[in-house]
Amino acid sequence: MSDALPELNPPLRTLMGPGPSDIHPRVLEAMAKPTVGHLDPYYLQLMDRMQDLLRQLFRTKNEMTMAISATGSAGMETCVVNLIEPGDSMVVCINGVFGMRMADVAERAGAVVTRVEKPWGEIFSPEDLKGALAEAKPKVVGIVMAETSTGASQPLPEISNLVHDAGGMLLVDAVTSLGGMLVEVDAWNIDAIYSGTQKCLSCPPGLSPVSLSNRAVESILARKTKVQSWYLDTTMLANYWGTDRVYHHTAPINMTYGLYEALRLILDEGLDACFARHQKNHEALKAGLAALGMEYAVELSHSLPMLNAVRIPEGVDDAATRRALLDRFGIEIGGGLGAFAGKVWRIGLMGHASRQNNVLLLLSALEQLLGDAGISFDAGASVAAANGIYAAR
Ligand SMILES: *Cc1c(COP(=O)(O)O)cnc(C)c1O
């Protein structure tokens, strides 16, 4: 007999990074339910129900609303490869990692890409886009609503009007925003939008909710070339998600259980209450961090409620401090990406992780660790400041 293989024993963490976020126990329980077939009547009914819940969350009537069987990046790829044919013009707004990724995906799909760039942490005004829209006459304009690499929140309604006045379709990355702040697909006239399960939906990574407007669907049906990706071709996926129920690929059944339960949790809480909770915990964290002398990497007027990007205090070791948070407190926060690497911490308050417990625990832990690093502040002031926000009516 050889030695027994090690048992699977992942540590219990508090996930306060840029995703994955803490998962509600009900979601994990749902995922452990019996697997049925992907054409089982029970599963088909569940797909219908899930589409309905996704429409409620996206605030849309879009027929073509479904979950792609892969992570958020596959949602991005789905929208791009279906809307773009080789040679099509696409404008991509870049102010962080995920705008850069979208431009890369678009180029691989054969788009002629015009990049409109802003410094990391800034957001786009309609003015910033006018020139590029006039010159490039894009079929599609891509923009990130919640740029997880910088913590910047991008308003969409005015930009949407501008894009449509110029004859384009608006493609929105809502991976981090969906479930944590208002996303109005119909009211803001968004043509294509994608999200992911492991940010504010608090599900494990593995599915990507996507919704396409009728205009987007018509443009896909009018394509002269086949969609470059077999797996992500929405015209074939529609035959599985629609009434025909034609096998396309084996759906990740138990992930669907998880997402269904996660959506139920959000809609039971109520969208307004859920968004208000995200905002409140963000304000409490912000007050606590200010008491520690820590500053946001973005202007406070457009900082996201679910992703707090803060400058690492002078003299504090980035990697060692994050490692100590993990080892001593079981807390995961994110380091900086790209231009923010080594300079910024990304503290997520996403979905089930957006709770008082997490805010107060992290602030207490930071007081210990920053104190050890010789940073001076009034002991206990950060927790008191956060409690001040919770006490306010
Ligand atoms: C996380 C994220 C993605 C990518 O999602 P994956 O699930 O990691 O593939 C895309 N856009 C934004 C804004 C994100 O935060």
Image: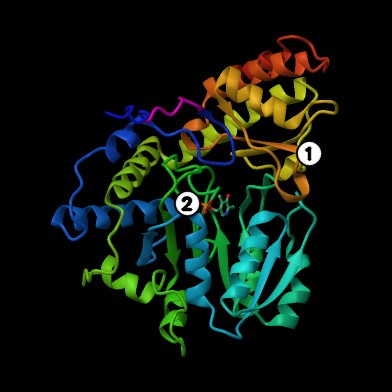
Q: Position of residue 171 (x, y in %)?
A: 56, 67
Q: Is residue 191 left or right of residue 230?
A: right
Q: Which residue occupies the extreme bottom position in the image?
A: 224
Classify 283 as above or below 178.
above
- Residue 196 numbered mark, or none: 2
Under mark 2, the amino acid is Gly
Classify 142 as above or below 200.
below
Q: Which residue occupies the extreme top position in the image?
A: 379
User: Quadrant location of the N terminus?
Assistant: top left
Which residue shows up at 77% across the image and 39% down it?
A: 342
Q: Is residue 72 left or right of residue 56?
A: right
Residue at disc 2, secondary structure = loop
Magenta residues, start to end: 8-13
Classify 254 as above or below 251.
above
- Residue 329 numbered mark, or none: none
Q: Does residue 291 appear in the picture of this structure?
A: yes
Mark 2 and mark 1: span between their CA atoms? Answer: 26 Å
| Residue at disc 2, CB closer than 8 Å to ligand 1 | yes
Depth check, front residue: 192 or 182? 192
Depth check, front residue: 304 or 8? 8
Q: By what rule are the colours in the image chosen?
A: rainbow
Residue matched to label 1: 343
- Residue 181 belongs to magenta span: no
Say which of marks 2 and 1 sits in front.
Answer: 1
Q: Position of residue 4 (x, y in %)?
A: 32, 28
Q: Position of residue 143 (x, y in %)?
A: 63, 62
Q: Is residue 130 left or right of residue 197?
A: right
Residue at disc 1, secondary structure = loop
Under mark 1, the amino acid is Lys
Which residue shows up at 53% across the image and 71% down it?
A: 80
